[in-house]
Amino acid sequence: MSASESHLPGVIALELSPEGAPPRAAIDTASAARLLEHLANDLALLAPGLDKLDLTLAGAHFDVAEALRPGWPLHRRLDELRARAPGQSTRSDARLIAFGADANGDIPPPLQSDPALAGASLRVLPFLVSGDEAAIAAIGDVLETELLDRGMASAATALLAQEAFATRIEHMRYLTVHDLLAMTSMQYGHMGLDPLWPILEAALLAPGEDVMLDAPPEPLLRLHDGEVSITLFSPQEWGRRYAAGEQDHDRLQRHMSQFEARQRQFAAVLEAHGIPVVYDYLPGAALAS
């Protein structure tokens, strides 16, 4: 990679029908190459000049959390494969590079999705626009402005994807990773996960930051050095912090069980996003010091 080369990571977002996940985790390379050509044509209508830049696609679908992880590992791995691959087709002086499954249905190991995160109705295929820093900055400005409002895939592209993955697709659109972040933030808000978002967002965009979630009745969390610590309380410590004055033993137990379930929920979300979670047995005051 040259010093002046830059990248714009994006995804093809597939909103699946309620019938279930695609039977195929990945499409073959020929199908991925056809889908990539459609992607290139669709994006070129929104961003003139994109045909001068490399465009790389993984013909495999992933959970949103797999695409939104610190260091953007899916896109980083896609670029590593791209760096070693010849262009399968060219547009002027740029390359179109697609990676798909081999004859056995396997895809290069770095681009295999996690079966534990399968089943969601929204799946994403990562793509990468690569080229000169100045060109990527200009294209990035356009796509960041245009995709969220005008990034629906063409009917021909959606039909091709539906046939390739052998599943019914309700909606298909293109997003930058920042668009995907914004959409995920709204979805998590609807799920009651607003308090966790500042921790998650900082872990993705500014992992070196030190961020606290210290807002009872929520669990006590701290992002530090890219890792999130969750404080575990003894019943006495928990009572002093979260239920001062409560005397009903059964109610205290019920509320503490709900609190522990909330801790597990937060931990599961963070771990799905590839953010390390540790449990800290120190009282909250010690953690915050």
Image (tube, rainbow, N blue to C red):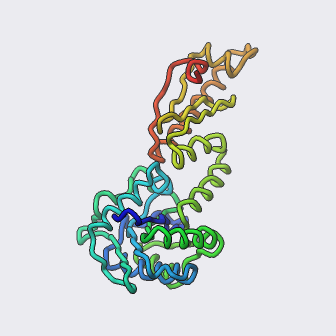
Rendered residue at 58%/41% (across/down): 199
Q: Give the position of the C terminus as an image quadrant.
A: top right
Q: Is residue 97 above or below residue 195?
A: below
**Residue 20 coordinates in the image, percent (x, y):** 49, 63
Query: Taking 26 as reference, is 66 left or right?
Result: right
Task: Examine the image and state in which quarter residue 245 appears.
Answer: top right
**Residue 237 coordinates in the image, percent (x, y):** 61, 15
Q: Is residue 156 above or below residue 6?
A: below
Task: Examine the image and state in which quarter residue 240 appears.
Answer: top right
Rendered residue at 51%/30% (across/down): 229
Task: Examine the image and state in which quarter residue 212 appears.
Answer: top right
Q: Is residue 182 above or below residue 172?
A: above
- Residue sitting nearer the eye, 125 or 268: 125
**Residue 68 coordinates in the image, percent (x, y):** 49, 53
- Residue sitting nearer the eye, 265 or 257: 265
User: Which residue is farthest left?
Assistant: 103
Query: Taking 255 as reference, is 91 left or right?
Result: left
Does residue 176 show up?
yes
